[in-house]
Amino acid sequence: MHKSFGSSNKTLSRSLSCDDSQSKDSVSTQKGSAKVDLSKLEMTALWRYLLHFNLVDSVPNPSKEQLIDVVQRHFVSQQLDESQVIAGFVQAAKRLKTVCK
C-alpha cells in the first residue's frame, strides 16, 4: 500500500535534470544535489517498485529500459516532506540499533 505524505511549505519536489553533466537516468532534487541513478537497479528491484505502487499495467512485458522509464516518471512525481522523511529515518535507525544489540 502506498503511504501518502502530507504536503507543507517545505515539500521537496523532484524533477528530471536536463544538465548535460548528468546521465539521462539521473534524478536530482530542485533544492539540493541528491541524485538517483535508477539504471543501477536490478530488474527485480524495478519490478518490486512497480508492484508496490501498482504500476504494472503501464507497459506489457517491458524491457529494463521501459521499466526504468516508468519507475523514473513515477519517482519524480512524488512529493515528500523533508522533515517527515528525516524523522522516519531517525526512528528506523533507532529501532535497528535496538534490535541489533
Image (cartoon, rainbow, N blue to C red):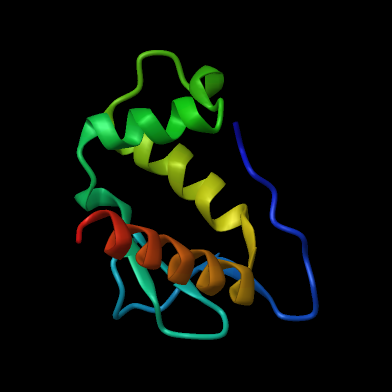
> Where is the C terminus found, in terms of image quarters?
bottom left
Could you tell me residue 92's position as x and y percent? 42, 60
Does residue 16 appear in the picture of this structure? Answer: yes
Residue 35 position (above or below residue 5):
below
Residue at 45%, 71% in the rendered image? 90
Left or right: 26 in relation to 1: left
Residue 11 position (above or below residue 24):
below
Q: Quadrant of residue 76?
A: bottom right
Q: Quadrant of residue 71?
A: top left
Q: Nearer the viewer, residue 21 or 12?
A: 12
Residue at 49%, 30% in the rendered image? 52
Q: Residue furthest top?
A: 60
Left or right: 41 in relation to 14: left
Could you tell me residue 3's position as x and y percent? 64, 44
Residue at 35%, 28% in the rendered image? 47
> Where is the N terminus found, in terms of image quarters?
top right
Residue 2 position (above or below residue 24):
above
Does residue 66 appear in the picture of this structure? Answer: no
Could you tell me residue 61's position as x and y percent? 35, 14
Could you tell me residue 36's position as x and y percent? 35, 64
Left or right: 61 in relation to 91: left
Q: How many marks?
A: 0
Q: Quadrant of residue 64?
A: top left
